[in-house]
Every structure is written in C-alpha cells, then in structure tokens.
C-alpha cells in the first residue's frame, strides 16, 4: 500500500541516548537495544471510520520512539498494517449501503492525510490485510500440516489455532486464564463456540459465508483471514522474528498481541526449530477517553482529527495537546486540553521567533533525557515551557543563544514544527 510523505527531520548536534520503554511482557521499563536498523511493527487502523484522537495519540507515542531511535543514530524500519477486511468494515458498509472496498480506501486516505498533518513519520512498509492473504494462507497451511491448527467440524470451514500446544502462550500479557477468557469474550473472541478444542483457541480463517467477500484459502477452500494471523504474517514478512518493538493501544494487549505473538512463534519454531520471541518489547499506549469513556468507534463518542482540522485547528496544537499527557496514562480529551495546547504553541512560537533567547543546549539535552526515559513527553513539554518563559521574560544577557537549536530539537524529537525561528 501507499504510505504517506515524510516530514523534514532536522539533524541535531551530537547523538541521543539509549531509549527506555515499558515492556508489557516484562512488566517494567527496559532499555531498547536495536541493531544499526531498529525494527518496529505498530498495529494500524481498521478503516471503517475516520482517525479519532485515540488513534492519533497511539501513533504519536510510536512516532516518538521512531524519532528517538533516529536521533540515537539508528536507521528505523517501521511497519504498520491496515486491517482492510474485517467484520466492522463489512457491518459499516452494510449499514451505509456502501461498497466495503470504497469505504476502506476512503478512510485509509483520510488517515494518511491526518498522519501527514500531524507530522507522523511514515512507515517504510504500509501493508494491507487483503494484499497479504496469499502469504497468510501459506502460514495457515503450515500450521495445519503440523497439526497445530484444525478445521472446525461444523461445515463452516473455520480454522482455529490450538493454542494449548503453543509454547509461550500467555507470555506477552502475563494474564491468568480467567482474565484471558474475559478479554477474549469482550474483544471479538468466541470462547463459547462448540467444537473448539479449547475455549481460548483463536480463529485463523473464516470460511466463506453468503454475502461476504472471500478469497482462495488454505487447501483449496474459500474465506477470509482472522485478525491475529494478519499481523503475525505481515510482521514476519516485513520485520522477521525478534524485532525491537511491537506496538499498539492497550486494548490490544490481549487477545490481539498475545495471539499474533503465539502464531508467529509457532511458525518460526516449525521453520527453524528454535523458540524465539516474536518481539523484544511489547509497548502499549493508554486509552484516550471522552466524557469518562474510552473513545471508540463502537461507542460513537469520537472526536476526529480531520474534523478539528476542518474547523481550522492547527495540527501542531493537536499534537501538543496529546503529547502533554504521558502515553501510558489513560486520559481524557477535553476542549480545555486543546485550548491550553494552542496557547502553549503560540508562546513557543513567539519565543522561537526572537533573535536570541535563553540557553538552548540544555533544552536539547533535557528533551533527550526526558524522552529517553519511557517517553516522558509531559516532562519534555515542561522544559520547553520553561525555556520559552525565560526567553520571553528576558532582558538579554551574556548567555543568550539563537533559538534555532530549540526549534530543531522540538521539531526532530517532539515532531512539533514551530515555523519561523530566530
Ligand atoms: N486494525 C486493528 C489493529 S491490527 C485495530 O485495532 N484498529 S483500530 O482502528 O481499532 O485501532 C487502531 C489503533 O488505535 C490501535 O493500536 C488501537 O489500540 C488504538 N486505539 C483505538 N482506540 C483508542 C483510544 N481510545 N485511545 C488510544 N488508542 C486507541
Ligand atoms: Zn494488529
């Protein structure tokens, strides 16, 4: 699939520090240790509606990781998927008497525009589920051949992964069975379905149903892929095993990331005889809410990035509003949050436009330190606030420096472009 255009990324003096992030599997903040090319896979949208501020917040968190690795001298291979076939897409298209392909293409195009406006660095590989079906089928056939997957004997042609036999199941979320069963039922799983070997077995392939689109499937059947095998396959084919960060919102901790990992680990063990973890760290962004509830398409309590843009809101203010909270804190979107961000952006811009300001080098160093420590963006924002206040208050003194380094640091590390800089 087509990705989106990259924003200019200023090069900063020196090199950034080692990035530490919270890994869900280990339950603690850990140092990332990428090779020359850092590898990241982040779960992309299901394009049946426009990008809301919850999606945006999640992609901004991973954009900070991307920027920090680049600042530390790594190349970054960033992969994101598009779940361009799944139940919600078909249900929405049906409701609106629309072609599901047209719906998906339109919302994906809008997402690209929103990401571009928010200055999110684009993925090197932007990959759809539909275009990946032949590779997904190869993987499901391999699991069937090995006896790790089974066809349900109810005539539907649905295929499941026998997770009880999968090494490492539970390793990503660390949840006990009761918790798993609860989340599985809440988030698209079917623990009660008769004929499964275990309630927690996830669907790999859904046999053809009347009125639903279908593609050639495993062993000459027809149907469409399950959700978790989609991400396992796309990640394996683009990033390989043991990539540095698997990312998404905290609603993906279980079942999605657990099963993506378990599918991929089983496939890798079959192919190589080795047991290796799918990802080196599983990083999850907290949920953005509105009026006390998680912002979600199914609840309909959404604030869309594109609507705010349409109202003339500066995307840099949206970015700043979302980054003024920490990525691991569930938080609410409010009109007040946006107003504060707009004022803050105006203040930063006023300071940056001056010919001289408070010392800049400590701001660069401080931003690097704050962000390296589990993406402390609120701490980073506070540092720039202090610099701007000092600069605007200033009578000139001997220590004054041109704001250029601050502008570049805010742009390269926080992704906030300040425009004309002194
Ligand atoms: N296509 C799948 C992932 S493979 C999916 O979850 N799509 S989504 O459109 O529902 O969500 C896209 C991304 O936004 C996911 O990483 C999800 O965890 C995240 N997300 C969804 N709602 C919120 C929210 N309210 N706050 C923060 N992140 C959210
Ligand atoms: Zn995914």
Image: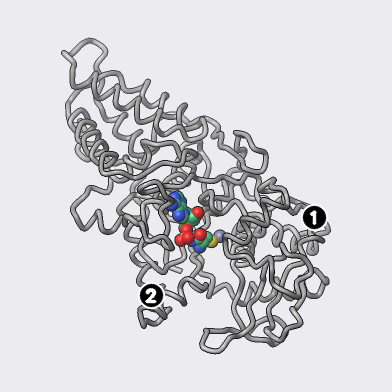
Q: In percent of the image, x 20 and y 28: which residue is there?
A: 351
Number of numbered callouts drawn: 2
How crowded pointer 2 is (Cα within 10 Å; few <14, some 14-19, many 20+) is rated as: many
Q: Secondary structure at mark 2?
A: helix
Q: Which quarter of the rendered image does ligand 2 occupy?
A: bottom right
Q: In percent of the image, x 65 and y 82: which residue is there?
A: 217
The reply, left or right, for residue 284 in relation to residue 137 is left
Q: Position of residue 7 (x, y in %)?
A: 34, 50
Q: Which residue is mark 1?
A: 167
Where 223 sits versus 410, above or below? below
Q: Position of residue 49 (x, y in %)?
A: 38, 66
- Cβ(mark 1) to ligand 2 < 8 Å? no
Where 159 sits versus 249, above or below? below
Q: CA distance from mark 2 to mark 1?
A: 39 Å
For the view shown, which residue lies furthest in the top direction? 398
Residue 125 seen in this snapshot = no
Q: Which residue is mark 2?
A: 103
Q: Position of residue 131 (x, y in %)?
A: 53, 74
Q: In percent of the image, x 80 and y 60: which residue is there?
A: 164
**Mark 2 or 1 closer to N-term?**
2
Q: Residue 74, labelled with which disc? A: none
Q: Position of residue 246 (x, y in %)?
A: 58, 50
Query: Which colouring convention does the figure follow?
Result: one colour
The reply, left or right, for residue 102 in relation to residue 240 is left
For the C terminus, the quadrant is: top left
Q: Secondary structure at mark 1?
A: loop
Residue 392 seen in this snapshot = yes
Q: In percent of the image, x 58 and y 65: which residue is there?
A: 188
Q: Quadrant of residue 379?
A: top left
How crowded pointer 1 is (Cα within 10 Å; few <14, some 14-19, many 20+) is rated as: some
């Amino acid at each position: 699939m087509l990705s989106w255009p990259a924003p200019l990324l200023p090069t900063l003096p020196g090199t950034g520090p080692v990035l530490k992030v919270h890994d869900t599997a280990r339950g603690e903040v850990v140092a990332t240790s990428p090779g020359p090319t850092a590898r990241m896979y982040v779960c992309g949208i299901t394009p049946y509606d426009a990008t809301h501020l919850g999606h945006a917040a999640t992609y901004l968190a991973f954009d900070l990781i991307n920027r920090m690795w680049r600042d530390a001298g790594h190349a970054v291979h960033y992969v994101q998927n598009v779940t361009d076939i799944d139940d919600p897409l078909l249900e929405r298209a049906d409701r609106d008497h629309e072609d599901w392909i047209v719906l998906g293409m339109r919302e994906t195009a809008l997402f690209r525009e929103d990401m571009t406006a928010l200055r999110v660095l684009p993925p090197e590989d932007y990959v759809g589920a539909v275009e990946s079906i032949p590779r997904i089928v190869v993987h499901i056939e391999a699991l069937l051949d090995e006896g790790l997957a089974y066809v349900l004997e109810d005539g539907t042609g649905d295929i499941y992964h026998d997770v009880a036999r999968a090494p490492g199941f539970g390793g990503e979320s660390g949840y006990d069975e009761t918790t798993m069963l609860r989340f599985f039922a809440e988030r698209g799983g079917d623990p009660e379905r008769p004929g499964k070997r275990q309630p927690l077995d996830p669907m790999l392939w859904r046999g053809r149903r009347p009125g639903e689109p279908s593609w050639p499937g495993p062993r000459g059947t027809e149907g469409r892929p399950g959700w978790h095998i989609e991400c396992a396959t796309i990640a394996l084919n683009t990033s390989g095993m043991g990539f540095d960060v698997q990312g998404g919102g905290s609603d993906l901790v279980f079942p999605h990331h657990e099963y993506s990992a378990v599918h991929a680990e089983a496939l890798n063990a079959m192919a190589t005889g080795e047991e290796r973890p799918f990802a080196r760290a599983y990083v999850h962004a907290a949920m953005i809410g509105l009026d006390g509830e998680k912002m979600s398409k199914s609840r309909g309590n959404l604030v869309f990035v594109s609507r705010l843009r349409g109202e003339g809101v500066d995307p840099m203010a949206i970015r700043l509003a979302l980054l003024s909270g920490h990525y691991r804190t569930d938080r609410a979107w409010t009109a007040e949050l946006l107003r504060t961000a707009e004022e803050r952006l105006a203040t930063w811009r006023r300071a940056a436009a001056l010919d001289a300001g408070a010392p800049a080098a400590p701001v660069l160093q401080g931003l690097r330190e704050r962000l390296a420590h589990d993406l402390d963006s609120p701490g980073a924002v506070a540092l720039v606030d202090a610099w701007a206040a000092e600069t605007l208050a200033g009578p000139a003194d001997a220590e004054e420096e041109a704001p250029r380094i601050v502008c570049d640091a805010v742009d390269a590390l926080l992704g906030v472009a300040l425009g004309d800089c002194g």
